[in-house]
Image: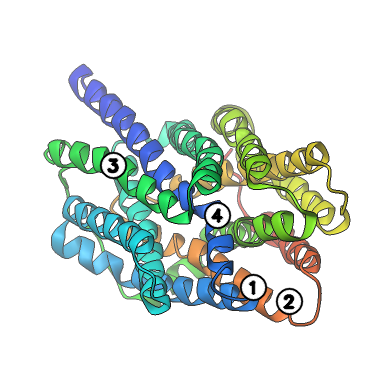
Amino acid sequence: MTLNPFHRRHKKNSLILLYFLGTILALANALPSYVQSNYLGTLFSITWVSLFFASANLITIFAIIYFPRLIKKLGNNTTTEIMLILFIFALLSMSLTTSIWSIFLSFILLNVASNLLWINMDILVEKFSDNSSTGRTRTIYFTMINLGWIISPTLSSFLVNKGDYYWVYIASALFLVPFLIILIKNHVRFKDGYKYKTQSIRKTVSGLWHNPNLRGIYIISFLLNLFYSTCVVYIPIYLYQTIGFSWPVLGIMFSVMLIPFVLFEFPAGYLADKYYGEKEILGIGLTITIIALFLFYSVKIPNAFLWGAILFLSRIGAALIEAMRESYFFKHVSAKDIHYINFFRTTAPLGYLVGTALGAIILNFYSLNNLFLFTALMMACGYFFLYSLKDSR
């Protein structure tokens, strides 16, 4: 069906607004991300930090599984507002509490609310997207999200260096205030326009597993998040405690490291839509990421430029995988398929769960850099699932 100019303009303006909201939400998520493991490391050993992350992500998986029922009952708009309020509460609680158990419970709520909010955003973006331009729409969206991630490491390291860790959580909560105001003011614009499909988790898993395209991209997404868990939880600890970089240096390194997400995702989405499809670009991204993990394992020189280059290389690979994952998956589902969209987002907490559980085991027997080698070997399994995908062009 051809849209009239008014509807085309409405969809375009709605997407622009969602891109902006994605940047704000990314800022709030990213600010604590690269300092969180070191903050928890001031309270626990590195093994306990691993278990801390594993527990939070296990609970998040169950929350994601049951989230479609809540969306169907209350609507995506209302659940977005609820999750946003819970996210703000969890951030403030992390900044104000001193009890270890309070921090643990706040961390779980923070993890659950932030993951569910991204599902709400997925549904909103998909609602205003056209299938013929899915690659470009999703990669513009992720480019805007990654702008928030680029800014955050330098800002969070500045806050830690000048004050303390709790200022990072307060700043993150403050960024969400305009998000909440914009969301409430545009309640009618984002109104649910159809009934969502829901089905049992067993049927969802069965349907996904018997579809080789959805199964393959699910596993590749899981492997990408396994890589992210290694880099977000353990790389800051390794570079700070083992290699010996200061927080001001790390903040700049992490910000520069994230530039590939802005530079490469949209061009990759455009090329996938117009010329190549996703499969070839996924293979390139997977290869680059595995090479970078081997470099994480082998390089021990405390040179900021060398490590900056390795981190930058790793994110070129991750950016290509991320862009093609989004493009490929959302070409195979619609906004009404919240059971598949929802389950697809279990790859993030599942990747962190497996990554941190693997970390807890490996660190009892080997030094931290060996974890990067194990992660590289696991990511090499992605080639098998990549081969099973039917290219979109």
Q: Which residue is mark 2?
A: 363
Measure the alpha-carbon separation of dots 1 and 4. Answer: 14 Å
Per the image, label 2 sits on a secondary structure element best described as loop
Query: Residue 241: horizontal and vertical position, in percent?
Result: 72, 60
Q: Nearer the viewer, residue 130 or 366?
A: 366
* Residue farthest toward the front in the current orientation of the protein: 162
User: Does label 2 or label 4 sit earlier along the sequence?
Assistant: 4
| In the displayed structure image, the side of residue 96 where residue 208 appears, left or right | right
Measure the alpha-carbon separation of dots 1 and 2. Answer: 8 Å
- What label does residue 35 carry, if any? 4
Task: Indicate the colouring scheme.
Answer: rainbow
- Foreground label between 1 and 2: 1
Question: Residue at left 45%, top 60%?
Answer: 344
Say what amino acid the circle numbered 4 marks: Val
CA neighbours of label 1 inside 10 A, class few (<14), some (14 to 19), many (20+): many
Measure the alpha-carbon separation of dots 2 and 4. Answer: 20 Å
Q: Which residue is mark 3?
A: 127
